[in-house]
Amino acid sequence: MDQFYSLCLQGDLNAAMDYLDSIQPRTKEMEKIQKMYMERFYSPESDEHILDEDKWIKGVLAAYHDYFRTVLTNAASLHEAEADLNNRLRMHLKVESPSTIDETENELAAIFAKKGYHFLGGVTPPYRGAYIWKRCEPIDFKVEIPHHSITVTVHMMSDFLLEGWMGFATFNNRTVGGWAQEDGLYCNSKRYKNLEHDDFQVSYLKHEAQHLSDYRSFPGLTSAELEYRAKLVELIYTKDHSILKKFLNDAKNEPEFPHPYASYNIMKDLSFAIFEKDYESNINVWLEEDYQEISSAALELFDKNTSELKMKY
């Protein structure tokens, strides 16, 4: 099901469902998943179970759920879907004067804070969030990234009500691990049960620490540029082909999706560096290559990119 969830994370549920339909023979688990998706995304009477009983919170979540359904099934344009979301939220807030979606979400954040929740709005490209969670515990880590170390505060988040469009698109089977902000890193703690495992130490901690370092050194980088550098850091520090296999599976040459687009550019650049090919898509070819060679090539790409950015800035 990795390919299915990768298509979901590329923001096109219709393509993901077509892919699921094409799989033969089908398992009971696949049939169960298809039924869940049909009920969530294609049923006119879809109704999500919301953990909190607060009617105001239920109304906000319902507005975001409907927005996610709309954009993920291409039922309306992004502009139309966002305008509808903003109108629904403003009506829920009982705000009559026109407000941008960002202003509306700032008001939501203030009310959620009074109700004991954290709220993060904005965009996880190409769609809007939001993320809503209850608990947050800070922990300090010293993190080695290429050519230096930094000390970061990681805010361990838990008890989520909403995990953005990616969580909604995958029934939280694939969710955002966290993000970097000026005041530190934010981590979805349920994703990482063992803080010593590479899933946390490399794919989360080093990845997000690189974002934090780049915010300071190269302000203004696009999301795709940030992801390109942070994903290279993962390849530099991991010990085997597992992350590379994930990047190859997720890669998509579409700039509006920063994560898949960064994976695509990394695989393209590594293909040229190692095989002198435009793009090697066969995972078996990659698995035959000694991983240390791949890691070294990733470091060379990272250093080359850093030199280019230093010239630019």
Image: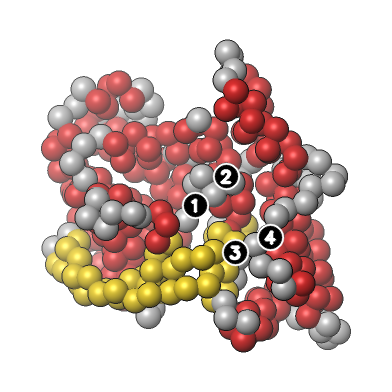
Identify the residue position indicated by label 2 in the image: 170
Q: Tell me: residue 296, above or below residue 88.
A: above
Does residue 169 lie above or below 86 as drawn? above
Q: In the image, residue 44 lies at what x, y percent?
A: 85, 44
Identify residue type, mark 2. Answer: Thr
Q: Spatial distance from mark 4 to mark 3, Cα to Cα?
A: 8 Å
Asked if the residues shown at circle 2 and circle 3 are in contact, with their CB atoms under 8 angstroms apart, the answer is no
Local SS, label 3: strand
Q: Secondary structure at mark 2?
A: loop
Residue type beneath disc 1? Thr
Residue nearest the observer in this picture, 55 or 120? 55
Q: From the image, tell me which residue sits under label 4.
A: 50
Residue 277 placement: quadrant: top left
In-image side of 71 versus 119 (left or right): right
Mark carried by residue 191: none
Quarter in which the C terminus is drawn: bottom left
- Pointer 3: what residue? 161
Mark 1 or mark 2: which comes first in sequence? 2
Q: Earlier in the sequence, mark 3 or mark 1?
A: 3
Residue 123 showing in the rendered view: no
Q: Is residue 110 left or right of residue 77?
A: left
